[in-house]
């Protein structure tokens, strides 16, 4: 999945509605199982890089910078499709997840129920991922 090679790449981006701070919410979903893996924000450059490379890129609000998922951990997300909602102000990246989506070592960032009970197995110790 790469859209940058088509003349419509800029047209695709221009249809999206970014917030006043230049961000758009991104829900990340397993392309095969449809499980929700994580939630993040992207700016125009991150969406453009995602469309261009086929790998998920986001904008980190805490670090105030662009990041490619897996750049430190090796847990890349290969993007199969990008969906948008009816208002074109939220995206879904449908991905193949390599390793863990969550920086805490879980397949999904949604590994707890509302009461705080862990409902998914931890796949890796974060110390083994990030040192």
Image: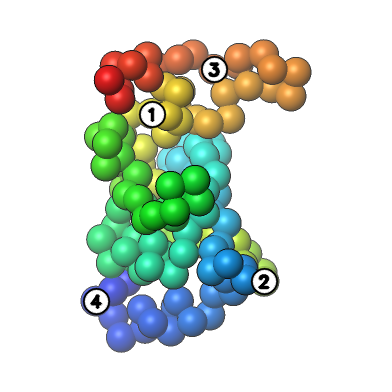
> Seen in the image, is 17 located left or right of residue 64?
right
- Disc 2 and disc 3: Cα gap in Å? 33 Å
Residue 26 percent across, percent down from the top left: 53, 54
| Image mark for residue 100 | 1
- Disc 4 and disc 1: Cα gap in Å? 30 Å
Residue 41 percent across, percent down from the top left: 52, 54
* Residue depicted at x 41% and y 22%: 105
**Mark toward the start of the polypeptide (3 vs 4):** 4
| Image mark for residue 87 | 2
Q: Nearer the viewer, residue 20 or 70?
A: 20
- Disc 1 and disc 2: Cα gap in Å? 30 Å
Residue highlighted by disc 3: 120
The reply to whether discs 4 and 1 touch (Cβ–Cβ < 8 Å) is no
Count residues near mark 2 (Cα–Cα under 10 Å), then give few for <14, some for 14-19, many for 20+. Answer: few
Residue 100 percent across, percent down from the top left: 38, 28
User: What is the quadrant of the C terminus in the image?
Assistant: top left
> Seen in the image, is 121 located left or right of residue 119?
left
**Mark toward the start of the polypeptide (3 vs 1):** 1
């Amino acid at each position: 999945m790469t859209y940058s090679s088509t003349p419509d790449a800029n047209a695709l981006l221009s249809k999206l509605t970014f917030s006043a701070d230049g961000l758009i919410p991104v829900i990340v979903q397993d392309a095969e199982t449809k499980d929700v893996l994580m939630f993040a924000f992207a700016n125009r450059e991150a969406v453009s890089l995602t469309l261009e490379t086929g790998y998920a890129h986001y904008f980190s609000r805490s670090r105030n910078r662009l990041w490619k998922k897996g750049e430190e951990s090796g847990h890349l997300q290969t993007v199969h499709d990008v969906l948008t909602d009816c208002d074109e102000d939220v995206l879904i990246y449908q991905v193949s997840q390599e390793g863990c989506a969550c920086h805490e070592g879980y397949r999904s960032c949604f590994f707890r129920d509302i009461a705080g009970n862990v409902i998914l197995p931890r796949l890796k110790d974060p110390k083994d991922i990030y040192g």
